[in-house]
Image: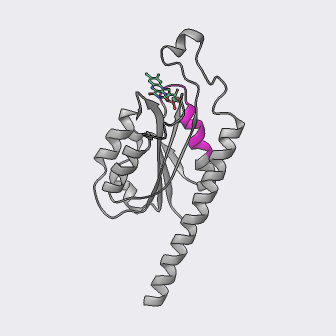
Amino acid sequence: MIMKAVIVCASVSHGNTRRVADVMGRILSARVVEPGEVDPAELADCDLVGFGSGIFSGRFHPQLREFVRSVPQTERGRAFVFATSGLPEPGFRPFTRPLERGLEQKGFEVVGTFSCRGFDTWLPFKLVGGINKTRPDADDLAAARAFAERLAVSTALSLSDCSDDHQTCG
Ligand SMILES: Cc1cc2nc3c(=O)[nH]c(=O)nc-3n(C[C@H](O)[C@H](O)[C@H](O)COP(=O)(O)O)c2cc1C
């Protein structure tokens, strides 16, 4: 069975998250779109939907959060969340958690999260020319590729389970 996947990505600062999204999109054969380029209702027939952006003041970009708020609540397929950020995700308060919860409330099954560092010119880092100047780098993109490969396998397996069920119910 061929899976249908879409990646919704808001990458407004340096294109850091878009580079990660494009790598994942190639593995998952997924269209990569900005929040304004897809009708939220269109996601209903997707097997897998990715949601990603940079992190701004500890949160995903407002365009992405607003898009998720506008998605109608219904039973849905699988979802994953990804981010690039200047600083590592704090273990005590992961910045991916609120978006995961929001997606679950919309009916998605959140099956994975990915984050890596990105070039960051947020003040005060701007004063020193920014931090993480070369990131996401080749290692980050290799990790994103491996993450997407695992998702592709697990989603294909879950879809073949469904078709087995159909055959049984016949
Ligand atoms: C205004 C602003 C606020 C930011 N806030 C944070 C933050 O709270 N935590 C963090 O780790 N990085 C922060 N960053 C860094 C971005 O998350 C990082 O550069 C990200 O890779 C940008 O992604 P993009 O190029 O895809 O938009 C901030 C950057 C800007 C410009």
Q: Is residue 56 above or below residue 155?
A: above
Q: Residue furthest front?
A: 92
Res 60 seen here: no
The percent position of residue 45, horizontal first and vertical second, equals 40, 62
Q: Quadrant of residue 130?
A: top right
Left or right: 135 as drawn, with respect to 166: right
Residues 24 and 151: in front is 151
Q: Per the image, is 70 magenta?
A: no
Residue at image position (66%, 46%) is 143
Q: Residue at x 66, y 39 (%)?
A: 140
| Left or right: 27 as drawn, with respect to 169 | right
- Residue 9: x and y, percent? 47, 40
Q: Is residue 135 left or right of residue 126?
A: right
Q: Position of residue 152 (x, y in %)?
A: 59, 60
Please state, as top left, top right, bottom left or bottom right, where the C terminus lies in the image.
Answer: bottom left
Can you name the residue that lies furthest to the right here?
138
Which quadrant of the figure contains the N terminus?
Answer: bottom right
Does residue 96 show up?
yes
Query: 20 or 140: nearer the eye?
Result: 140
Asked whether 20 falls inside the magenta stretch, the response is yes
Where does residue 26 sit, x and y in percent of width and height?
62, 50
Q: Is residue 81 above or below residue 168?
A: above
- Residue at image position (71%, 37%) is 138
- Colouring style: one colour
Closer to us: 54 or 87: 87
Q: Which residues are magenta?
A: 12-23
Q: Is residue 163 above or below residue 96?
A: below
Does 115 sit above or below residue 117?
A: below
Per the picture, the main secondary structure of the magenta-coloured stretch is helix
Q: How many marks can you see? A: 0
Q: Which residue is drawn at the image coordinates 68% and 33% (left, top)?
A: 137
